[in-house]
Amino acid sequence: MLFTLALLKILLLTHTPSKSSAHRRLLSPHAAPNPAQPGLCAASVLVHGYKCQEFEVETGDGFLLSLQRIPEGRVGGGGGRSRPPVFVQHGILVDGMTWFLNPPDRNLPLILADRGFDVWIANTRGTRFSRRHRNLNPSQREYWNWSWDEIVAYDLPAAFEFVHRQTGQKMDYIGHSLGTLVALASISEGKLVDKLKSIALLSPVAYLSYMKTPLGVIAADAFVGEMIQLLGFSEFNPKGKAVAKLLKILCASPGVDCYDLLSAITGKNCCMNSSTVEVFLKYEPQPTSVKNMVHLAQTVRRRAVSKFDYGTRARNVRHYGQARPPVYNLSSIPRDLPIFIAYGGRDSLSDDRDVETLLDSLRLHDGDKLTVLFVKEYAHADFIMGVNARDVVYNALISFFNRW
């Protein structure tokens, strides 16, 4: 109770009410991006000698998402339809930039391009390259009224449809962290399947019952997301004053050591050098919605993969026609869909017991269509920033894709 009261006090002291609607500027769908902020292509791809194209995809609920294409490797070889497309989806509180923090021969998208793939990079709504909307802007609370349910229902289908129209081919999919959850949930509802060739899940977080990161556990148990929401916050910005104050309170809790904040969240990563971490902190973390954080906290507390719980029977009935949120039935994923799963023994977010629960939901999967890679020394971030990830994970992943 003292923790809750202290947290409420901090949030009240740091809360700044949003501007009135009279002072809100609606973004034109054709408004130019901020010239002071280069796109992902310019910042992380073209500088290494690769071709890169920037696209914008509109979702069914009006969000304008940034999507990058690396059509071929540095040595050329031609782009277009002959190269199999692969869609790369990042996790929570980061964006597409997080895949490009290592040198070209050590980061997954450029390795894929050099190995003959047509690479497409996603950027989730609310992150720096995907903050535009047909009618809203990020200063409005309505802009942030979404959770990962909407990524499942709108973002992935819109991006998949766009890539399919451009390439005319089914695609491979790579997701990390939340990027695995949204794919599994979407596929379980019959979305994406007709455009998918195979999927690779790095550090899957479908179930979070055994998540052992102290910072995440105490945040979920303290209902932090709900308290922020009640106080009028809608954007969860890790670089903002309110969240910084919140982290200060959480990090002072017994058993929470935030001296190494990345490890406090992900587990002790084995294989990231200090320069990579410095670049990561320069570009990340990225904002998301408070509602999204609440939804993830519900996943932790309720030990189920279900849609957002609106808190009361009446509200759930209004949204879903039933008293409790519907469950995403992961066992309904097609048994013949090729799936590659890689997880680590030191991962505090994707605990091996939770991955075993996921594997149990896939127990009837065709045996030759499911490949599982366990890396004992890896934690959550090693799969995207580990200096040896190419040899430990990526080569096996690419060999898996080339089988289908």
Image (cartoon, grey):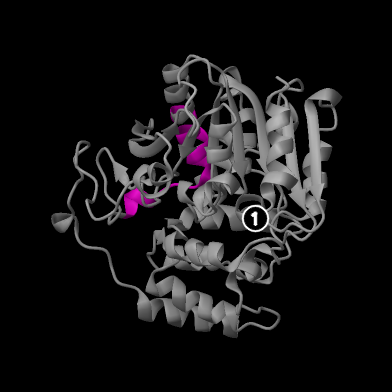
Q: Range of the magenta residues?
A: 141-158
Position of the N terminus, as image quadrant, is bottom right
Where residue 210 appears, as percent x and y from the top left, is 77, 58
Q: Is residue 47 left or right of residue 183?
A: left
Identify whether 135 is placed above or below 169. Answer: below
Position of the C terminus, as image quadrant, is top right
Q: Is residue 311 visible?
A: no
Residue at mark 1: 387
Q: Give the quarter of the image for residue 340.
A: top right
Q: 397 or 299: nearer the eye?
A: 397
Where residue 180 appears, as percent x and y from the top left, is 63, 41
Outermost residue toward the left in this view: 22
Examine the structure image and report whether residue 154 is included in the region drawn in magenta: yes
Identify whether 57 is placed above or below 148. Answer: above
Residue at 47% x, 19% y: name it. 164
Q: 238 or 139: nearer the eye?
A: 238
Residue at 58% x, 68% y: name it. 274
